[in-house]
Image (cartoon, helix red, strand yellow):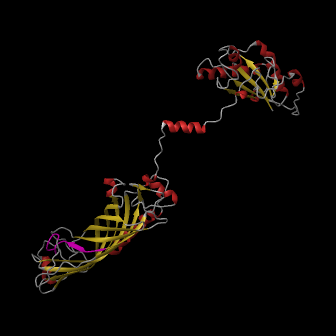
Amino acid sequence: MKKVSLIALLVIAGFLSKVSAQYNPKASYDGPYKLNTWAVSARIGPSQFYGDLREYDFWPVTLQNFDSQSEAGTLNFGVTVHKQLSHLFGARLDFNTGNLRGMKRRIYFSYFRGNYSQLDLSGTVNLKSLLLGPNKMKRWKADVSLGFGQMFYSAKAYELGTGRLQRSVSGANDWVIPIGFEISYELNKNIDLGLEFRANHVNTEKLDATIGGDPSSIYNGGGNLIGNGGSTPRGNSSLDMWGYGGIVLTYKLGKNKAQVVKKDGKWSYTPEAGNVYHLRFTDPKLLIKPPKILTLAEMDSVAKANRPKDIDPKLLIDTDGDGVADFFDKEPTTPAGSVVSGAGQKIDFDKYIASAMPNGDFNCTEIFANVLFDTDKNELRPEYQDMLGKVVELLNKSQCRLQLAGHADRRSNDRYNMGLSQRRVDMVKNYLISAGLKDANKIIIDYYGSFKPIADNMTKDGLKKNRRVELRLLP
């Protein structure tokens, strides 16, 4: 039974430690910075038994005489491996060993001496941060813990006065539930100093080699030994318990260890400098810098600093409305409806079409033309039909493509103007297809509403030039 219980406990502890070893800090808490999470502790302090052979509930008997045996002088030593899973929750694996003493004049007139070893696994809760928050009592940590484990023990009970052996238990083991409280102070980036108190509820009455509440427990029916950890009837009293208090020294593991410092009355974190804080004392949320809320003046300053340079008006103005801005136009006064080159020079479109060859040797240079529309209309005016028919002839004879861009003047809202410019460009495209265009995929469509004017929308002539569909021949 003892071997089976020990193996089960070690398997569970090994599984949890394996899970902890694979733990990814970024998956358990918010924040861009990794924190150290492991620590080891050592403790030493007095142990104390609570059960049948116990004279008083709390204070140990220290008197040593004929009918009294001292309950003081017991000692517990332990080591712990900590794993902080988040700032509030963690796990710990404990090993404790030590001795227990107790006596009882009434009923039993006995005292006992016992030794134990215990292995247990517990979960912890950071009570200080849970109740007070991570920024109060920054250097302090108060944990409560609850777990389960296995206790291995031996004990002998003697008669007061004579010292005669009455009962004994050796090589026994039972399940135990430890409940604890620890308070610690962060001395520096490596060491924490603390105090710990723990009560261990054991599933037995044999820690003191006495089965309580029954007269047979005095001499066990004539002084025979209880046995070597075997099955023994349970008495009428409560199960045994033992506890300890101790000084705890904790060493925090990890690379690039750092301790938060206080500057100008505020705790200052600098993880970006390579500092790695420990999750025991640092809430990862404190490492996330809050977003800066800009004032109106700051937003205005940022907007001005990032505003692009003003566009030269000469890049937008197209006086003759031929599709080429005045800045690039070498003939800024070509007649309305003219087909021009990329330099804004009028070309003989008929001659240009006649030179086109379908074998791909034809050089499709950029040429421009505009189709104008009446106010709030998308009907094609008759004077542009001949020019568009020639465009169809050129596209069918060559590998050239055609880009159509629809526009509107400013005399409506943006949503309406976008729709109007789209209807105008669709009208031109549909006309080209109805006029015999063989490959409609050669046409590229864009529409901009009133966002790209080429003339002043405050004049009648400017409004007229802005109501247009631009034709641009592309290679």
As displayed, is residue 15 above or below residue 356? below
Q: Position of residue 47 (x, y in %)?
A: 25, 74
**Left-right relation of 188 to 366:** left
Q: Position of residue 345 (x, y in %)?
A: 83, 24
Foreground pick, 364 / 161:
364
User: Magenta residues, as a range?
Assistant: 44-58
Could you tell me if residue 153 is visible in this image? Answer: no
Q: Position of residue 119 (x, y in %)?
A: 34, 71
Q: Residue at x 28, y 66 (%)?
A: 177
Q: Position of residue 442 (x, y in %)?
A: 76, 29
**Left-right relation of 58 to 425:** left
Q: Quadrant of the C terminus?
A: top right
Q: Quadrant of the N terminus?
A: bottom left
Helix, strand or loop for the magenta stretch, by majority: loop
Q: Residue at x 74, y 13 (%)?
A: 381
As displayed, is residue 86 above or below residue 100? above
In the image, residue 144 lies in the stretch drawn in magenta: no
Residue at the outermost left position: 106
Q: Residue at x 63, y 23 (%)?
A: 418
